Structures are given as structure tokens and as C-alpha cells.
Amino acid sequence: MSVTETEKTGARTDQAATVITGARERIDALDDRIIGLIQERMAVSAVIQDARIASGGRRVNLAREMEVLAHYRDALGKPGTSIAMTMLELCRGRI
Ligand SMILES: O=C(O)C(=O)C[C@]1(C(=O)O)C=C[C@@H](O)C=C1
């Protein structure tokens, strides 16, 4: 492991730097998949919103948003609610 690689990871040993570099590659791959899933969710959400608006309804459905928030909170605890709120903002804009 090069000095730069060890510095980049904050590790104090080559062994730790190797573990961290490998795990960071996995995290980058997971983040790519998560971003792809968020983009897919945004597209599906847009289909729902467009259909509702075209039928004369409103973009937002607060009762459904409560279900989505509860789903994330039940799975991830309190920070899950923040993730869900950010997700909803990405999907329907700010309200
Ligand atoms: O399920 C709906 O009715 C949607 O419009 C989708 C969605 C969402 O992205 O989850 C987006 C906006 C609504 O306010 C509620 C939920």
C-alpha cells in the first residue's frame, strides 16, 4: 500500500488501509445502486402524480406520504423519517 493510499484512508497500517480501500469500493458500488433506485422511484412517482393531476387531482397526497414516512421510520428508526422526507422532496418537489 502506498503512503498516499494510507493517508487517504486515515489508516495507520497498510493492513487497515487495504481493508478500508476495499470496503470503500463496495460502498461506492452500493451508492451507485441506491442512486439508481432513487431515480427509478422518482420516475414511478412522477407517473402517479401526472395521472392524478391529469384527472383533476392534486400533486400531493398527504395520507400516502404518512404511510411512506411510517414505512421508513419502522425500518430505520427516527433517521428513517428524515430519509423519507428527503426522498419525497426529490419525488414531488418542495411543498
Ligand atoms: O403515492 C402517491 O400517491 C404518489 O404521488 C407518490 C408519492 C411518493 O413519491 O411516494 C409522491 C407524492 C405524494 O404526495 C405521495 C407519495
Image (cartoon, rainbow, N blue to C red):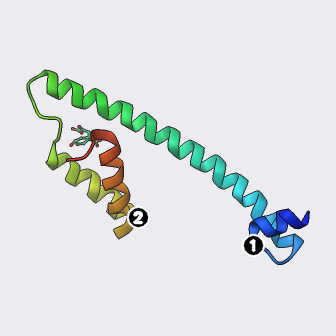
Q: Quadrant of residue 16?
A: bottom right
Q: Residue at x 83, y 68 (%)?
A: 6
Which label belongs to residue 76? Answer: 2
The reply to whether dot 2 and dot 1 touch (C-beta < 8 Å) is: no
Residue 30 position, x and y percent, is 60, 49
The furthest residue to the bottom: 12
What is the crowding at mark 2: few (fewer than 14 residues within 10 Å), some, or many (at least 20)?
few
Quarter that holds the N terminus: bottom right
CA gap between label 2 and label 1 equals: 29 Å
Q: Nearer the viewer, mark 2 or mark 1?
A: 1
* Residue 77 drawn above or below residue 65: below
**Residue at disc 1, secondary structure:** loop
Residue 68 position, x and y percent, is 28, 51
The furthest residue to the left: 56
Residue 67 position, x and y percent, is 23, 52
* Mark closest to the chain's N terminus, 2 or 1: 1
* Residue 19 drawn above or below residue 39: below
The furthest residue to the top: 54
**Residue at disc 2, secondary structure:** helix
Side (left or right) of 12 relative to 95: right
Which label belongs to residue 10? Answer: 1
Quadrant where ligand 1 appears: top left
Q: Looking at the image, which is closer to me, 44 or 59?
A: 59
Side (left or right) of 81 relative to 5: left
What is the crowding at mark 1: few (fewer than 14 residues within 10 Å), some, or many (at least 20)?
few
Q: Residue at x 16, y 42 (%)?
A: 61
User: How many numbered discs sit on the rendered protein?
Assistant: 2
Q: Residue at x 20, y 24 (%)?
A: 51
Side (left or right) of 8 relative to 74: right
Q: What's under tag 1, amino acid-wise? A: Gly
* Residue 52 drawn above or below residue 15: above
